[in-house]
Amino acid sequence: MEKLFIKNRKGQKIAVIVEKNVDQRGLTFVMHGLGGFKEQDHIQTFADAFKEKGYTVIRFDTTNTFGESDGNYEDATTTNYYEDLEDVIEWAKKQPWYEQPFCLAGHSLGSICIALYAEKYPDRVKALAPISTVVSGKLSIATEKHKKVAEEWQRTGWRVENGYAGIVKKLKWSHVEDRLKYDLLPEANKLTMPVLLIVGENDDGTPPEHQQILYEKLPGRKELHIIKGAPHTFREKDHLAEIKKIFLRWIDKFLITPKA
């Protein structure tokens, strides 16, 4: 495993982990969600499944999150996360292990970013795993979870909440305004590559019904799995083990070609 720091288009530092497979069978980029980081258990689980199948895996911290990259969480937007994904891939193109088409996996806000990338550059993407994905800004603000906090968030300009491991998370209302610019549904027909959707049964941010809307729009080989009893962010060992099994089966089914 190699950890290094690169620069994005704004000159900000991005922390990247490269896990090379000597007998490389493919390349995968794995992206965390809003306020996430590259070492989270579910992000590690996605990465581990690909590694076990011979893939070289790239994980990174976007800017404006709680990882090792520059920026502040309060400034986080879908736009800045997406641009960082593009910048990491552009950097990767100059590396000896780079190959195309590659796979993309992500969680939540990271998932809408990888899916937007796949809609923009479908020929570059071999397969797509947008887990617990934000489907659109419009659907995001329609959830009961958002409605409960929206009035005060808009009035004060801030959403303040206690995050995992005692972190206090403060996010600007401009995050919502930016998210409303994005919607996977109008160009979902471009996602002709194999697509894996997974969501927690009790996810109140990107609920199963949102995933079903996207699933029905996908034109190609697709799967939707609902993890019983799981919330938006997967932390329970049983849930993570189930997700890894789903990934491994999916990779075997669609991504592993016999060696000559």
Image: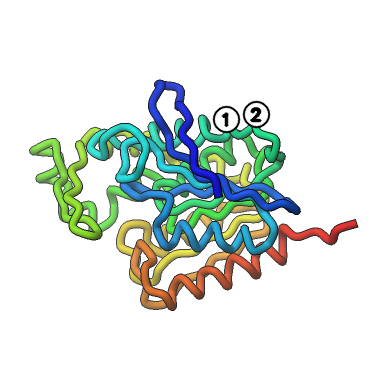
The three-letter code of the residue at mark 1 reads Trp
Question: x%, y% of residue 183?
Answer: 44, 41
From the viewer's perspective, is 104 left or right of 184?
right
Residue at disc 1, secondary structure: helix
Inspect this view and state whether residue 123 appears: no
Image point (72%, 66%), residue name: 253
The 10 Å Cα crowd at callout 2, few under 14, some 14 to 19, many 20 or more, is: few
Image point (45%, 31%), residue name: 83
Q: Mark 1 points at which residue?
A: 91
Question: x%, y% of residue 233?
Answer: 36, 62
From the viewer's perspective, is 100 left or right of 15?
right
Image point (23%, 37%), residue name: 74
The 10 Å Cα crowd at callout 1, few under 14, some 14 to 19, many 20 or more, is: some
Quick one: quadrant of the C terminus? bottom right
Tell me whether circle 2 and circle 1 mark residues in contact (CB < 8 Å): yes
Which of the two residues, 246 or 216, is positioned nearer the viewer here?
246
Which of the two residues, 31 or 138, is positioned nearer the viewer here?
31
Any mark on residue 94, and which?
2
Question: x%, y% of residue 163?
Answer: 22, 56
From the viewer's perspective, is 15 left or right of 244?
left
The three-letter code of the residue at mark 2 reads Lys
Eyeballing the image, is 259 above or below 35? below
Measure how far apart labels 2 and 1 are at the Cα level. 6 Å
